[in-house]
Image: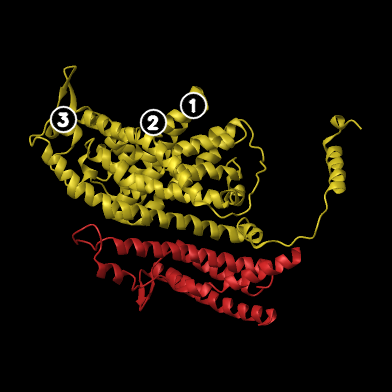
Amino acid sequence: MDKLKLTPEERWNYLDKLAAKVVTLKPRRLSLKDAIGDLTIRPLTGIPIALGILFSVWMFFSTFAGFFTDGFMVPLFDEHYLPWIQNTFPKEPSWLYALLVGTPGADNCFEAFGVLTTGLFVPFGVVLWAIIALYLSIALLEDIGYLPRLAVLVDNILHKIGLHGFAIVPTILSFGCNIPGVTAARILETKKERFMMMTILAIFIPCGAQLGIMEETIAEEYGNWLMFAIIGYLLFGYFVVGWVLNKILPGRSPEILIDIPPYQRPTWKNLTMKTWIRVKSFLVHAVPFVILGSLLVNILYIVGIENGNLTLVSFEESDKSIMGRLSIALEPVLAGWFGVPKETILPLVTAFLRKDLAVAQLSAIPMSMYQLFTSVVLISIYFPCIATFAMLWKELGFKGLLKSIIILIISAFTFGGLLHGLWMLMGVA
Amino acid sequence: MDPKTKYSLGQYYFGILSLFIIGFGFLELLFFLTGGEFSYGILKIPPALIRSIVIISMGIFMLTGASRLKSIDGLALVTLACIMLWIFAANDLFEVVTTSILPEEDAEGWFNSLDGFLSTYKGPYNPCVILLPFTLPIFLFIRNYKKELRVFED
């Protein structure tokens, strides 16, 4: 028999006969691990378990990050480091002072905005601890074998937007950092799926750094519910835009077979190694952007244009700076369409470099809770940070990136404007 | 104790425990809806939405599983409910440990005083921590099942 000429059905029959000859089957009882594994993929039992596990990750994240940030980093930076650096520099505010130390007389590193104050406090005082907690939790879920089960559980929901269950893996990774999330989207089979996944990840999933700052600023002031509401709104956008893209983009979304490994005990060595590799990547790739972001924003704040020449402007004349002029020029869009203060332009410019730094800057702008909600949503969706942007370029090519940017601009105007409309209907805008 | 009596006792034990779990879950949900909080002795019931939904679900899993504890499905349901409670309790205990290390608000220094450190452990604790030791008998049944499985495979 020429096995190469067999139809698929004949080939399966042949394999069955072959297996019957060489495999001896013994009756087998389910092990407890198998039975628990089954329960975590059945919707009735799996959904409450998934909710519980994701909520536990959140609890651990808040406690761990809060312990290091509020317990040690805030006192270290605000009570010791900031006064020291303010006294070390000459008392008279100068452009160098503005660039490196930031606002004269600032009493905390969140609102100083200098390269050596906010630029160091955000990555090392806040974000580092948030991402360690998040990466440790993600590594644990990966190692015990829960993530593939979550993929099976959400398969039906994700099929509604043209993706399959395994898309949950890049999504969860993106909650740590968008870059590994975008990279993990490579596992999706078709070009359509990869484009959709990368685009909605970059637009709607807030990274761990941003979540850490949100926890420190928004949740501290208004409570966790506001953070959950913001994340909920972003996830709503994730599904709506995903659904629309699935309808309008050509291409197919085939089924995929994934191997579900048995539950296993995680090893400490694996967990620490995975966490360290990811944290190291943050330190190497993200920290320079935070510092660069602080520097760029401060330059835009102290440099003005007069008669076509660049001039230095003082803090009191910040309206004459490039940033001041930008905020005046964009006021109709920001205040008119989105209903946020014109000063939001500063975090929006920063967000292109680092979203965490941008959220930190938002906390210093006086605004209502509703405006804060819209501003955080805008910062999340209006543009991916530059590192994610570069990764999208690499993965999608220039044409794909352009398409992604068009979707992003439409999404920002739609979802930002929608919120403003909602606040107007509620009479709180 | 013969296995039949053991499983029968286990069914009652986990059945009653599950009622406590469901009750605590409903109280957390009630306090979330009404904005209250309860604290008495070493027990405190905080207002919580997501947590309460998960705790109530775990109570229902345990109640369902307890009624057929001898089967692998029942045992798995009870074990899963216990694991989820342990995860919540571990998170609560982690919060207690971190609170005990840090100084109280407006206090000087980087670390808590010895008195402050020790007094944190007096409680009160969330229901999952209180319920934690009562879920440990599940290990007896897990061990039993593993023993039966070994006999079966041999």
- Placement of the N terminus of chain A among the 4 image quadrants: top right
Real-space Cα distance between discs 3 and 1? 37 Å
Colour chain A is painted in = yellow
Q: Chain of mark 1?
A: A
Q: Which residue is mark 2?
A: A386
Q: Residue at x 52, y 44 (%)?
A: A239
The kind of residue on which mark 3 rests is Leu
Q: Chain of mark 3?
A: A
Q: Position of residue A409 (x, y in %)?
A: 42, 32
Q: Position of residue A264 (x, y in %)?
A: 59, 54
Q: Which mark is residue A96?
A: 3
Q: Which residue is mark 1?
A: A394
The kind of residue on which mark 2 rests is Ile
The red chain is B
Is A280 displayed left or right of A311 in the figure?
right
The kind of residue on which mark 1 rests is Lys
Q: Nearer the viewer, residue A394 or B4?
A: B4
Is A53 displayed left or right of A306 in the figure?
right
Q: Are marks 3 and 1 in contact (CB under 8 Å)?
A: no
Q: Which mark is residue A410?
A: none
Q: Chain of mark 2?
A: A
